[in-house]
Image (spheres, rainbow, N blue to C red):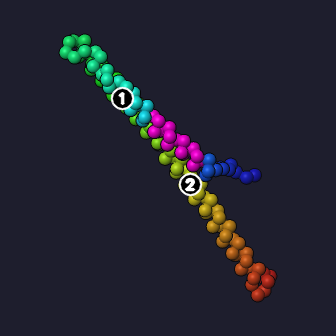
Amino acid sequence: MIGPTFEGDPAVLRDFMGRLKGIAAQALAIGADFRDELAPNQDWFGRNDEYALSAGFQFRRTLETLNQTFSSVSDAVIGINNGRIQELSSIKGAQNYAEDQIADLNNQTENITNSPSGGKH
């Protein structure tokens, strides 16, 4: 019985990695766009009264949390992409090793059949 096998299609993985890069960029862009949209209204809570001090602190803290969230999403996607790059490298390494082994075996076979004795012992 043959053991478990692993198949990987480098072209599919490369396509997936390209899509992941786009998703990471979109996550950062959404955060930046949201901050830009809020900029004209960032003092909506007032300036110097008690409510402004309380709401302003909470608003800025919420905005920082939002920034961290979009950054974390982007970092996670980039991490997934880096894992896929390592996976692709492993697949290519296994493929290259197998091709080298096949070439070595072919050379050994040619040496046997091209020997003066015709490959007979």
> Cβ–Cβ below 8 Å for labels 1 and 2?
no
Q: In the rendering, at what x and y percent does residue 47 appear?
A: 22, 17
State the predominant SS element of the stretch in magenta: helix
Q: Residue furthest bottom?
A: 116
Q: In the rendering, at what x and y percent does residue 28 appear?
A: 42, 35
Name the kind of residue labelled 2 in the image.
Answer: Ser
The answer for how far apart the CA atoms under marks 1 and 2 are is 42 Å
Asked if residue 14 lies left or right of residue 103, the reply is: left
Mark 1, mark 2: which one is toward the viewer? 1
User: Which tag, 1 or 2, sits closer to the chain's start?
Assistant: 1
Q: Quadrant of residue 34?
A: top left
Q: In the rendering, at what x and y percent does residue 87 appear?
A: 55, 50
Residue at mark 1: 36
Looking at the rendering, the stretch of residues picked out in magenta corresponds to 13-27
Residue at 62% x, 50% y is 11
Q: Residue furthest left?
A: 48
Residue 22 got which mark? none
Residue at 45% x, 34% y is 27
Asked if residue 85 lies left or right of residue 109, the reply is: left
Residue at mark 2: 90
Mark 1 burial class by Cα count in 10 Å: few <14, some 14-19, many 20+: few
Question: Looking at the image, can residue 72 be seen?
Answer: no
Above or below for 38 versus 17: above
Residue at 47% x, 38% y is 24
Give the quadrant of the C terminus. Answer: bottom right
Asked if residue 110 lies left or right of residue 34, the reply is: right
Residue at 49% x, 47% y is 82
SS category of the residue bearing label 2: helix
Q: Residue furthest front?
A: 40
